[in-house]
């Protein structure tokens, strides 16, 4: 039986890239303050309001940058752990047909869950995290595979009481 890989975990630098817009807001906020304090010398309510909002934007962006930078060591450590799990092949693999597929809405966010030989998986597009999370609402493949009754081979690890999908392989259709 031949399988085709349709999803495989790859390292993402998403969390580190989030700092870039924060730096833009930081510069924008304090840039507004600098501009209006140096080039608009006449005091007015409008000037003071713009300076206030400039400080507000700059300070909020500064706090968010600090929080993001503090979390970088944890992000790097988690990423190294996942790379070690993949390199050492210390993940679990389950193979079979998708069973008990269901999707549900929670606060306007779509969640999907299913089992393969009793091993449960749950994911959503709206949960930022590692592993597979593409729902059928956003062209995810699981519902289609379930309807076709094809077998899957799923590689996963247990993380925070959830099974995180590292790799999905689908049985090739016989022609």
Image: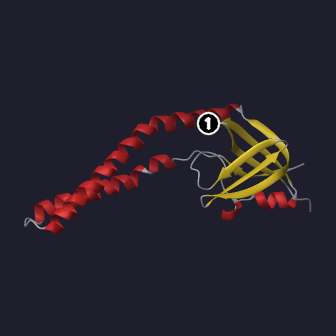
Say how many tags the image has: 1
What SS does tag 1 mark? helix
Please tell me which residue is depicted at 72% across the width and 40% down the height of the picture.
156
Relative placement, left or right, of 175 versus 49 is right
Mark 1, other Cα within 10 Å: few <14 / some 14–19 / many ≥20:
many
Q: Is residue 175 above or below residue 77?
A: below
Above or below, comparing residue 145 to residue 154 in the picture:
below
Q: How is the image coloured?
A: secondary structure
- Quadrant of the image containing the C terminus: bottom right
Farthest-out residue, right: 175
Quarter of the image holding residue 36? bottom left
Q: How far across and how far down the image is residue 51, in percent? A: 19, 60
Measured as percent of width and height from the top left, residue 117 is found at 85, 42
Residue 96 place in picture, x, y as percent = 86, 46
Toward the left, the furthest residue is 42
Q: Tell me if 16 is positioned left or right of 43 in this view.
A: right
- Left or right of residue 122: residue 4: right
Image point 80% across, 47% down: which residue?
115
Please provide percent x and percent y for residue 49. Answer: 20, 64
Point 60% across, 61% down: residue: 108
Residue at 45% x, 39% y is: 72
Q: Nearer the viewer, residue 144 or 169?
A: 144
Q: Nearer the viewer, residue 63 or 19?
A: 63
Residue behind mark 1 = 82
């Amino acid at each position: 039986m031949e399988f085709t890989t349709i999803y495989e975990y790859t390292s993402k630098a998403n969390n580190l890239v989030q700092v870039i817009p924060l730096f833009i807001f930081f510069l924008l906020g304090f840039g507004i303050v600098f501009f209006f304090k140096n080039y608009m010398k006449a005091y007015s309510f409008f000037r003071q309001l713009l300076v206030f909002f400039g400080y507000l934007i700059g300070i909020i962006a500064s706090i968010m940058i600090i929080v993001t930078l503090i979390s970088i060591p944890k992000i790097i450590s988690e990423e190294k752990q996942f790379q070690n799990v993949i390199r050492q092949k210390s993940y679990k693999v389950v193979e079979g047909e998708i069973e008990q597929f269901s999707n549900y809405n929670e606060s306007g966010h779509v969640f999907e869950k299913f089992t393969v030989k009793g091993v449960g998986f749950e994911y959503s597009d709206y949960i930022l995290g590692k592993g597979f999370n593409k729902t059928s609402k956003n062209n995810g493949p699981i519902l289609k595979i379930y309807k076709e009754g094809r077998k899957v081979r799923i590689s996963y690890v247990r993380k925070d009481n959830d099974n995180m999908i590292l790799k999905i392989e689908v049985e090739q259709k016989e022609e």
